Image: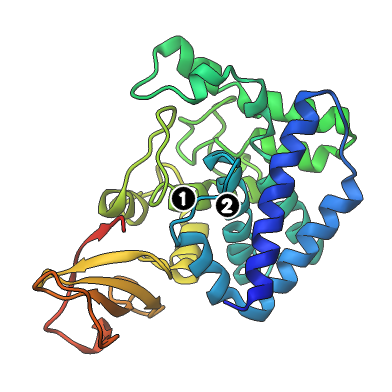
């Protein structure tokens, strides 16, 4: 990735962190500045989407920034990738990016002992977590955001089958842009886990996504997302049937289960020095057995 993209990515995460601090102390945000940030993201994606997707799925730690804040940026970027491939309007792209970026501001109103708890949450704690879309909308209304944005935010945890929250909406009754965010949130479960949501790692998360069968996600949006992001996203890591560990460096849109990979760890466990590239779609000797965390 071009150095400028790395800088822009890290800067946006820092801004999300600062916004949370501002809100916790009763401050306000400038809507125009946030709109400019999303417009900049859209332009970055149009210029080099593959590098940005790779950045999203690369493991990273940023000092003094929570995983939740990093996730907000990652989900916003992936939502914009899908939105671009769905050919939604520029106005809808802007609304989608803003809503995806700010949808979890309400987590700042959830007690930290719940957010930071290791292990499973109690029913009461989970119920508190599930209030965060409502909290987010309260904050956004106070900041002066339009109803079009708050509607997307309040419905981003609704499910296609009606088993989501907070309202139990289903199918096309759910805001279209909220449905995009819902699918992308499923992808985020591949690389991040939370005790307060149904998060799965690696291949289990992938199976959940491709085998959804109209439960969580709008099938039409899911179909586009699979082609846009891939079953094994750029920058993620997989284990092959020969026990080697590889990094995904290319997506075959017509064969999403068979991406292009670069060998990182050889089958004997040694570090690869050859940087061998394998296009699994053209090589029947190899197949992916699982996703891995590196």
Point out residue 175 in the picture as x, y percentages from the top left corner. Answer: 66, 44
Quarter of the rendering containing residue 97: bottom right
Q: Which residue is mark 2?
A: 75
Quadrant of the frame with the N terminus: bottom right
Quadrant of the frame with the C terminus: bottom left
Give 256 or 40, whichever is nearer the viewer.
40
Q: Earlier in the sequence, mark 1 or mark 2?
A: 2
Q: Which residue is mark 1?
A: 188
* Helix, strand or loop under label 1: helix
So how many labels did they put on this image? 2
Whether residue 8 sits left or right of residue 51 in the image: it is: right
Residue 220 visible at all: no
Point out residue 18 in the picture as x, y percentages from the top left corner. Answer: 75, 40
Residue at horizontal 43 percent and vertical 65 percent from the top: 226
Residue at horizontal 15 percent and vertical 73 percent from the top: 270
What's the CA distance linking mark 1 and mark 2?
7 Å
Q: Are marks 1 and 2 in contact (CB under 8 Å)?
A: yes
Whether residue 189 sits left or right of residue 257 in the image: it is: right
Q: Is residue 87 above or below residue 122?
A: below
Point out residue 29 in the picture as x, y percentages from the top left corner. Answer: 87, 39
């Amino acid at each position: 990735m071009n150095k400028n993209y790395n800088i822009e990515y890290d800067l946006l995460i820092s801004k999300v962190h600062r916004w949370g601090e501002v809100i916790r102390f009763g401050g306000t945000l400038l809507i125009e500045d946030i709109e400019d940030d999303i417009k900049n993201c859209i332009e970055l994606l149009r210029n080099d989407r593959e590098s940005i997707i790779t950045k999203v799925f690369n493991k990273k730690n940023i000092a003094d920034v929570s995983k939740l804040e990093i996730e907000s940026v990652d989900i916003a970027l992936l939502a914009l990738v899908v939105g671009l491939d769905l050919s939604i309007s520029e106005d809808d792209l802007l609304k989608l990016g803003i809503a995806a970026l700010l949808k979890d501001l309400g987590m700042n109103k959830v007690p930290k002992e719940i957010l930071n708890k290791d292990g499973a949450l109690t029913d009461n704690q989970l119920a508190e977590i599930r209030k965060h879309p409502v909290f987010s909308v309260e904050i956004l209304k106070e900041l002066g955001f339009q109803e079009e944005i708050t509607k997307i935010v309040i419905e981003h945890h609704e499910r296609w089958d009606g088993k989501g929250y907070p309202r139990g909406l289903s199918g096309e009754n759910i805001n279209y842009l909220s449905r995009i965010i819902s699918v992308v949130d499923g992808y985020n479960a591949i690389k991040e886990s939370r005790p307060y949501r149904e998060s799965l790692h690696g291949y289990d998360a992938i199976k959940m996504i491709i085998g959804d069968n109209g439960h969580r996600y709008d099938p039409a949006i899911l179909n586009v997302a699979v082609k846009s992001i891939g079953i094994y996203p750029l920058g993620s890591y997989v284990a092959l049937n020969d026990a080697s560990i590889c990094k995904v460096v290319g997506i075959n849109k017509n064969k999403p289960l068979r991406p292009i990979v670069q060998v990182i760890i050889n089958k004997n466990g040694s570090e690869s020095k050859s940087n061998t590239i394998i296009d699994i779609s053209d090589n029947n000797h190899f197949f992916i057995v699982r996703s891995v965390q590196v």
